[in-house]
């Protein structure tokens, strides 16, 4: 099978491309505009495979999409290309509307016209799938434990008490709080999630109106190797290694359900190959963690894994670094910040037999180790040289 992956140079897209090339016999056409978030260096390990090809194309460019469909004749599409960073969507929503809504519409139309040209009743037409990859943020947010307990008890002397949080996290009351299911109503909060919700609606309308064979997945927060360091986990790891502040929004009590990116890539491949047309599948890691807990755990792992050479950094106050958690700094909360996300992924488990392999602890340890071992990739992202390939500049 030949799969057209959009956004294959991004964080999750590159994990999907690596997964397909390394673990299956299928071919991949990676279609990516290479925005700041696209990094071909994340595909070094598979780029010479004869089952891999790359097209630098914007999903808003209909003529180019038509060319790609005609030239490569894909059997399925996995659509991951998007603007994906919530903070950027608050300061500049236009790109999010353009790529996530207009781009998805343009891709749907190009794909539908191509699908219409396939001979009716042929296996190729029947097997064709348009798999739209989306987020749990379309559902808005869920009740937070502190909506049930008194919010004040989460604070001790104005500082976060991690012991207090761990006790709270281990109570059965928290586990009985609601989760997002495939039936949860949409209630997006940010320009990012509203644009993703719009794209989900377009995809469902193309199924209902035109009978175009679509599948949607909505996933929780991903983390793992090759993550662009504007997102919480890589930002914290790389800032810590430079002795910079580790910024925490508000009190750091926002809860996210974390999934290791390679578990997500496996899930997505299962959905595109075995999922039922017209269905939605929620994908999550069953790892509800407060942001502050995530950051503290990263600091503990770094305290253990970072070499004495790596720890030899100057802190802002000029003092030597004792423990990475001393770098934690609380900053003003993001406007409209969702308080809690948590996914019920039992449908994926029951219908497609998928479960995550990594626990949060094993996945986070692997991730920290990957950043320690891949300083060249990190340096190229931090100094912008990863974009030279995109811009055609010799290094
Ligand atoms: P990312 O920002 O790392 O990558 C996005 C990729 O899309 C980049 O390679 C970029 O160059 C490309 N792209 C952007 N605009 C484009 C355009 N107009 N045409 C073609 N390519 C374009 O994003 P990610 O974190 O890998 O997320 C991938 C998808 O998964 C997104 O649709 C996102 O909404 C969804 N998602 C992400 C998460 C998460 O935790 N990161 C969770 C759930 C769902």
Image: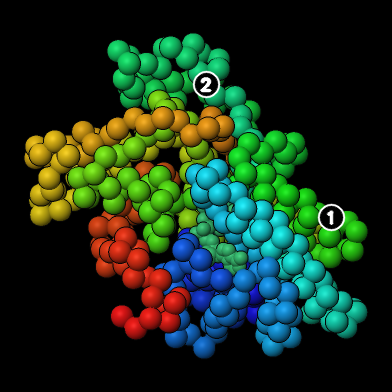
Closer to the observer: label 1 or label 2? Answer: 1
Mark 1 or mark 2, earlier in chain:
2
Inter-mark Cα distance, 1 to 2: 36 Å
Label 1 crowd bin: few (<14), some (14–19), many (20+), radius 10 Å: some
In the image, is 140 to the left or to the right of 34? right
Name the image colouring: rainbow
- Asked if residue 220 is positioned above or below residue 6 in the image, the reply reads above
Seen from the viewer's position, the closer of residues 131 and 190 is 190
Residue 363 placed where, x, y %? 39, 50
Per the image, the residue denoted by label 1 is 205
Residue drawn at x 23%, y 36% is 327
Helix, strand or loop at disc 2? Answer: helix
Residue at (38% x, 81% y) in the render: 393
Residue 330 drawn at (x, y percent) = 34, 30
Q: Is residue 189 above or below residue 16?
A: above
What label does residue 145 carry, if any? Answer: 2
Q: Residue at x 63, y 36 (%)?
A: 189
- Relative to 298, does residue 39 appear above or below in the rendering? below
Q: Quadrant of residue 3?
A: bottom right
Quarter of the image with the N terminus is bottom right
Nearer-the-camera pick, 316 or 354: 316
Say few, some or many: other residues with alpha carbon within 10 Å of mark 2 (under 14 / 14 to 19 / 20 or more).
many
> Which quarter of the image is occupied by the C terminus?
bottom left
Q: Is residue 270 visible?
A: no
Front-most of residues 283 and 189: 189
Q: Residue at x 78, y 50 (%)?
A: 201
What number is the disc on residue 277?
none
Ligand 1 lies in quarter: bottom right
Q: Determine if residue 105 is in view.
A: yes
Q: Helix or strand or loop: what does disc 1 sit on?
A: helix
Image location of residue 381, percent across then percent down: 35, 63
Q: Position of residue 7 (x, y in %)?
A: 57, 66
């Amino acid at each position: 099978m030949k799969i057209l992956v959009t956004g294959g140079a991004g964080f999750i897209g590159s994990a999907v491309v690596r997964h397909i090339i390394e673990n299956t016999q299928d071919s991949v056409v990676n279609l990516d505009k290479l925005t700041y978030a696209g990094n071909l260096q994340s595909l070094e390990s598979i780029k010479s495979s004869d089952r891999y090809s790359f097209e630098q194309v914007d999903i808003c460019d209909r003529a180019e999409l038509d060319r790609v469909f005609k030239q490569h004749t894909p059997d399925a599409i996995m659509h991951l290309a998007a603007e994906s960073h919530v903070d950027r969507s608050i300061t500049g929503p236009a790109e999010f509307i353009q790529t996530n809504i207009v781009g998805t519409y343009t891709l749907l139309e190009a794909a539908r016209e191509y699908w219409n040209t396939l001979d009716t009743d042929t296996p190729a037409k029947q097997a064709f799938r348009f798999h739209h990859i989306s987020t749990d943020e379309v559902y808005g947010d869920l009740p937070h434990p502190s909506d049930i307990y008194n919010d004040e008890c989460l604070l001790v002397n104005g500082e976060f008490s991690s012991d207090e949080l761990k006790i709270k996290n281990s109570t059965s009351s928290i586990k009985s709080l609601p989760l997002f299911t495939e039936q949860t109503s949409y209630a997006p909060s940010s320009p990012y999630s509203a644009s993703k919700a719009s794209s989900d609606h377009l995809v469902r309308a193309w199924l209902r109106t035109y009978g175009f064979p679509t599948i949607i997945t909505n996933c929780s927060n991903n983390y793992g190797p090759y993550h662009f360091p504007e997102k919480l986990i890589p930002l914290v790891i790389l800032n810590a290694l430079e002795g910079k502040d580790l910024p925490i929004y508000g009190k750091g009590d926002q809860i996210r359900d974390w999934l290791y990116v390679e578990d997500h890539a496996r899930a997505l491949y299962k959905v595109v190959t075995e999922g039922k047309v017209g269905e939605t599948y929620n994908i999550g890691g069953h790892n509800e963690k407060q942001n502050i807990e995530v950051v503290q755990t990263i600091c503990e792992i770094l305290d253990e894994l970072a070499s004495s050479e790596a720890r030899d950094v100057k802190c802002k106050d000029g003092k030597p670094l004792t423990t990475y958690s001393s770098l934690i700094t609380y900053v003003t909360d993001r406007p409209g910040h969702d308080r809690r996300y948590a996914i019920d992924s039992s449908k994926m488990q029951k219908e497609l037999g998928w479960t995550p392999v990594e626990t949060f602890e094993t996945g986070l340890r692997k991730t920290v180790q990957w950043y320690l071992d891949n300083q060249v990739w990190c340096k190229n992202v931090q100094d912008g040289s990863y974009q030279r390939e995109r811009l055609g500049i010799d290094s």
